[in-house]
């Protein structure tokens, strides 16, 4: 029995890393996935998952651009008539300690990691409301809670996502829409591949399960909150970090 049979899902930032893992797991569970990304590589990712039997298509969408989001949502609705699940996964880092951080580096992180949630939520909620069903799940981070050196912009943006989640769940719960966040710990992806080996070794030593997470691990964390069975869980942040920071 597939858990997301014919459910229509948007995964933002799905071209690589965690987003790609979410697309793979959701497709295995029978979902129809719209993979959004600014990178054209999203096309190849969608083709690879499709070749493995998934129902997935790529839409080149920058989640900071209202018109692009509106147009992509309209085309999904024209084809499939509904959007069941929104995964706000797209995110960026621009790490630098506060006195060296440029205003541009601060603003870029806020625009992609936070402003995008305003844009995507306003585009999909009217359709979820009409269907009286929805799941909205956004990517926070362990660093929203632990903080990280050189990441004032990123940690602040990921904490904002938790506040957004708490507030939005109160507004849309009456339409049977749940709103949650996933706070990944240290996960293998292009975002973390650039870290020096000794930093990775030290990080693993601090993780009780003694490994870093995989995009597939995150796919299953999102799947749990996205499932119909999770209908009484809303306003929650699921910490998926191998026990690195019990919250
Ligand atoms: P990643 O950099 O590998 O992938 C992010 C994807 O988002 C990329 O494909 C990128 O092109 C896309 N993207 C960036 N800006 C976009 C925009 N404006 N519009 C559409 N797409 C855009 O990152 P990842 O490691 O897979 O992380 C995914 C999410 O999980 C991010 O929000 C990240 O902050 C969060 N996260 C990651 C980790 C980790 O250890 N990897 C830990 C905690 C939280």
Image (cartoon, rainbow, N blue to C red):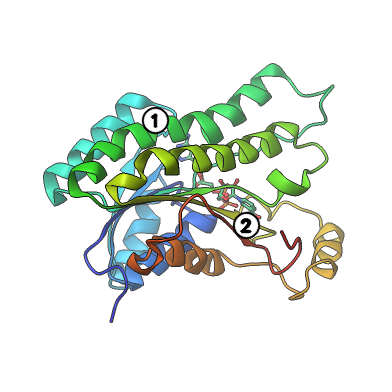
Outermost residue, top direction?
A: 103
* Residue drawn at point x = 56 percent, y = 40 percent: 161
Side of 180 where 49 appears, left or right: left
Which part of the image, by quadrant, shows the C terminus?
A: bottom right
Residue that carries the numbered disc 2 in the rendered image? 184
Side of 169 where 200 appears, left or right: right
Q: Residues within 10 Å of mark 2 (few under 14, many from 20)?
A: many
Please name whichever residue, 234 or 80, is drawn nearer the observer in this view of the structure. Answer: 234
Please name whichever residue, 46 or 80, is drawn nearer the observer in this view of the structure. Answer: 80
Residue that carries the numbered disc 1 in the rendered image? 119
Residue 195 visible here: yes
* Residue drawn at point x = 61 percent, y = 22 percent: 107
Marks 1 and 2, how far apart in space? 23 Å
- Residue 197, numbered circle: none
Quarter location, residue 26 = bottom left
Residue 39 visible here: no
* Residue drawn at point x = 48 percent, y = 69 percent: 220
């Amino acid at each position: 029995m597939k858990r997301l049979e014919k459910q229509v899902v948007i995964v933002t930032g799905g071209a690589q890393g965690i987003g790609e893992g979410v697309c793979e797991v959701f497709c295995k569970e029978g979902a129809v996935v719209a993979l959004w990304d600014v990178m054209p590589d999203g096309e190849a990712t969608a083709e690879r998952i499709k070749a493995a039997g998934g129902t997935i298509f790529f839409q080149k969408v920058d989640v900071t651009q209202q018109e692009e989001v509106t147009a992509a949502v309209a085309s999904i609705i024209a084809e499939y008539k509904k959007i069941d699940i929104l995964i706000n996964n797209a995110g960026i880092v621009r790490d630098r300690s506060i006195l060296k951080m440029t205003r541009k580096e601060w603003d870029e992180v806020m625009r992609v990691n936070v402003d995008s949630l305003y844009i995507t939520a306003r585009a999909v909620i009217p359709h979820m409301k009409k269907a009286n069903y929805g799941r909205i799940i956004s990517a926070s981070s362990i660093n929203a809670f632990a903080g990280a050196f050189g990441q004032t912009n990123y940690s602040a943006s990921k904490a904002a996502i938790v506040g957004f989640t708490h507030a939005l769940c109160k507004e849309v719960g009456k339409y049977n829409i749940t709103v949650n966040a996933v706070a990944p710990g240290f996960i293998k992806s292009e975002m973390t591949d650039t870290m020096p080996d000794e930093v990775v070794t030290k990080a693993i030593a601090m993780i009780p399960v003694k490994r870093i997470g995989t995009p597939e691990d995150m796919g299953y964390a999102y799947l749990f909150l996205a499932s119909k069975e999770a209908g009484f869980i809303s306003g929650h942040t699921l910490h998926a970090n191998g026990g690195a920071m019990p919250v």
